[in-house]
């Protein structure tokens, strides 16, 4: 009997096709049509450069996986994967652009971190297919280096930080959103199947998904991985509900996916019903900016809190959740 290979890490699975992308059907359909058109034009001996593509949306919703699937669908040979902060070094950006050829996919994650100067260099590279070198003592006019028609993919969580000219140059704009529960369940099922991990019941998948804040990265990288760690630590290959509950106890994730900081925020707010941001920050020992940019977005989206001027108010839904968690000994 052949030995079944069982994975140990959720990231061992590589997405190599757009057909494997779940929960973002509008994005997938847009990309499939665009890629099919690109290959049709090439078959007719017409010049065709795919993209450039902007992948826009919240963190953890599949932009990176989709970028890698695009690269595979195009059958490009070279994938250059980098981030906007790294490309603030002009020499690095120039080196990448000069080295890229027609079989290169350049994927820049967190593109909003690219500074203004280098955004302009990137804009010129895709609009004119040239790289202009600065004037020197021996050259009165800038020298232009021709560039190959490489494929450019930009991913960003804050598109407003991209220059209008660069943003508008993106021929294909894919907008990602948070995932419905059933899509998350299917993503988790897909990953467990690919890794050879068994699950006791669909309730295992549902519970993992329900505590993922509508985000695949949390569903898979955090929740599913920890459930597997609990299961495999006992030398088993089937994730049970007991494993799932133990995983969330260790992670301190509650019944709707809130982490300890989010729980602490809600508990402080529940005591008074309404507090100013700086007061909450001092009570839980975090900078106000961390609270407003990291903790509050999901609480607002889930209708657990509301903003009223400088005040934060807990909603009826938020108060009900806190009361329910306080009645559970483990808080999950």
Image (spheres, rainbow, N blue to C red):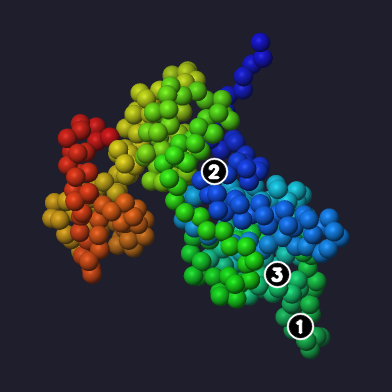
Q: Label 3 vs label 2: CA separation?
A: 30 Å
Nearer the observer, 191 or 109: 191
Is the residue 189 above or below the residue 95 in the image? above
Dot 1 or dot 2: first in sequence order is 2
Q: Residue at x 63, y 75 (%)?
A: 120
Is the residue 165 above or below the residue 184 in the image? below
Q: Residues within 10 Å of mark 2 (few under 14, many from 20)?
A: some
Residue corresponding to mark 3:
126
Q: Secondary structure at mark 1?
A: loop
Among the 4 quarters of the image, the one containing residue 167: bottom right
Nearer the observer, 240 or 27: 27
Residue corresponding to mark 2:
22
Tell me residue 79's x, y (percent).
Answer: 70, 52
As drawn, which residue projects farthest toward the right?
A: 45
Dot 1 or dot 3: first in sequence order is 3
Q: Residues within 10 Å of mark 1 (few under 14, many from 20)?
A: few
Dot 3 or dot 2: first in sequence order is 2
Q: Nearer the viewer, mark 3 or mark 2?
A: 2
Among the 4 quarters of the image, the one containing residue 286: bottom left
Residue corresponding to mark 1:
142
Q: Label 1 vs label 2: CA separation?
A: 47 Å
Q: In this rendering, does residue 283 appear at all?
A: no
């Amino acid at each position: 009997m052949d030995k079944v290979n069982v994975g140990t890490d959720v990231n061992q699975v590589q997405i190599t096709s757009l057909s494997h992308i779940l929960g973002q059907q509008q994005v997938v359909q847009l990309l499939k049509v665009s890629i099919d058109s690109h290959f049709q034009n090439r078959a007719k001996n017409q010049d065709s450069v795919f993209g450039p593509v902007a992948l826009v949306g919240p963190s953890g919703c599949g932009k990176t996986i989709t970028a890698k699937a695009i690269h595979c669908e195009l059958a490009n040979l070279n994938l250059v994967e980098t981030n906007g902060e790294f490309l603030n070094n002009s020499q690095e950006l120039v080196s990448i652009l000069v080295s890229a050829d027609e079989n290169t996919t350049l994927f820049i994650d967190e593109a909003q971190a690219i500074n203004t100067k280098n955004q302009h260099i990137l804009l010129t590279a895709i609009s004119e297919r040239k790289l202009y070198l600065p004037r020197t003592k021996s050259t009165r006019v800038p020298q232009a280096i021709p560039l190959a028609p490489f494929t450019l993919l930009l991913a960003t969580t804050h598109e407003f930080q991209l220059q209008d000219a660069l943003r508008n140059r993106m021929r294909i704009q894919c907008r990602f959103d948070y995932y419905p529960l059933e899509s998350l369940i299917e993503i988790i099922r897909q990953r467990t199947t690919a890794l050879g991990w068994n699950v006791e019941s669909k309730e295992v998948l549902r519970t993992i998904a329900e505590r993922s804040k509508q985000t695949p990265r949390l569903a898979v990288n955090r929740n599913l991985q920890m459930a597997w760690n609990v299961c495999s630590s006992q030398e088993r290959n089937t994730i049970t509900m007991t494993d799932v509950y133990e995983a969330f106890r260790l992670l301190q994730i509650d019944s709707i996916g809130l982490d300890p900081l989010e729980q602490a925020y809600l508990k402080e707010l529940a005591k008074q019903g309404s507090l100013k941001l700086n007061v909450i920050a001092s009570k839980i020992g975090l900078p106000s900016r961390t609270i407003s940019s990291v903790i509050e977005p999901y609480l607002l989206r889930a209708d657990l809190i509301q903003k009223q001027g400088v005040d934060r108010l807990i909603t009826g839904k938020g108060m009900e959740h806190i009361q329910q968690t306080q009645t559970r000994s483990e808080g999950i």
